[in-house]
Image (cartoon, grey):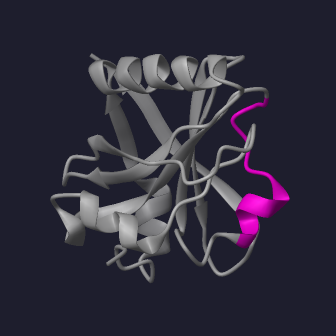
Amino acid sequence: MWPNHRATNVIKRRNFWLPLSEFSRLRRRSLIAANDGLREICGYFVCGPDGQVRLTFTLNRTAEPSRFKMRKADLGVCPTRRQVWGTFHSHPLGEEYPSETEANLSNFSPLLMIYSDIFEKIALWGYFRSRTPVRLNLRVRR
């Protein structure tokens, strides 16, 4: 289901990019959710051979503020199931850095993308053989 993470050096050197239209969609949905009781958005992302990232939004299964909850079964929402690379979610009040709790979810998804509503920044993180996140190259481009 996830990409072969034995090739961690290749993934660490890879240049990922998010189209501006996807970033705008992420930002818009995130702001709406944040204004609705500091809710987070979440979902999965796929990556093409050129490093282009596409987002698939799923239901946040908790109504708790500044929390998100997903199930592996939600992966069925993604039309290209075999190409899923990781998960994403928003931080309504925080920076684009993973929390300790999110590090514990790294078995669920070894790649994690986080969008910060406050700073309007996005970051991609990888967990390789440890719970220490490694920031990966991710750019937003037209």
- On the picture, is 22 further left or further right than 131? left
Question: What residue appears at the point 45 percent right and 17 percent down from the top-left corner?
Answer: 28
Question: What residue appears at the point 56 percent right and 43 percent down from the top-left corner?
Answer: 89
- On the picture, is 105 further left or further right than 43? right
Whole-percent x and y of residue 69? Answer: 60, 57
Q: Quadrant of residue 18?
A: top left
Q: Is residue 88 above or below residue 66?
A: below
Nearest the eye: 20 or 30: 30
Nearest the eye: 44 or 58: 58
Whole-percent x and y of residue 142? Answer: 26, 16
Q: Is-magenta flag for residue 113?
A: no
Q: Is residue 62 above or below residue 3?
A: above
Nearest the eye: 103 or 71: 71
Question: What residue appears at the point 63 percent right and 51 percent down from the top-left corner?
Answer: 62
Q: Is residue 71 above or below residue 133?
A: below
Residue range in magenta is: 94-104
Q: Quadrant of residue 13?
A: bottom left
Q: Is residue 119 above or below residue 101?
A: above
Whole-percent x and y of residue 76? Answer: 26, 67
- On the picture, is 54 further left or further right than 72? left
Whole-percent x and y of residue 60? Answer: 53, 48
Q: Is-magenta flag for residue 97?
A: yes
- On the picture, is 70 further left or further right than 91? left
Q: Quadrant of the N terminus?
A: bottom left
